[in-house]
Image: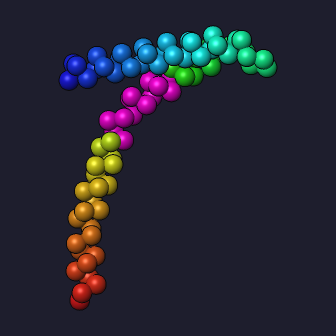
Amino acid sequence: REMGRKWILIAIALSALYGISDEFHQSFVPERTSDIFDWFADLVGASLLFALQKPLLALLRLEKRLTELAIPQAADRQTE
C-alpha cells in the first residue's frame, strides 16, 4: 500500500514537471503564452485522476460483476 502511494506521488511529480516544461516551451510558440494557472490546472487534473482512479476502477468492476450476473438471468427469461 505504501508503495502504491509512493508511485502516485512520483507520477504527480512527473506530471508537474511535464506541465512546467510544457509551459516553458509554450513561451517560444507564437500566439501562445506561458501561464502559471495553466500549469496549476494541469497539476490539479493529474491529482484528480489519481484521486478518482481507485473509485472509478471499483465502479467498473462492480458494473462488470452486475453484467455477468444479469446475462444468465436474461438468457433464462428468453427460453421460458
- Horizontal and vertical percent for residue 74? 28, 76
Q: Residue at x 36, y 35 (%)?
A: 53
Residue at 45% of width from left, 28% of height from top? 48
Location of residue 63 (image quadrant): bottom left
Colour style of the rendered protein structure: rainbow
Q: Quadrant of residue 57?
A: top left
Q: Residue furthest left?
A: 1
User: Along the line of sight, which residue is nearer the eye, 24 or 77?
Assistant: 24
Q: Position of residue 22 (x, y in %)?
A: 59, 16
Q: Main secondary structure of the magenta part?
A: helix
Magenta part of the chain: 44-56
Q: Is residue 68 magenta?
A: no
Q: Position of residue 14 (x, y in %)?
A: 43, 16
Observer able to see residue 35: no
Judged from this view, the residue extending furthest toward the right is 31
Q: Residue furthest bottom?
A: 80
Judge left or right: residue 24 versus residue 74: right
Q: Residue at x 33, y 47 (%)?
A: 59
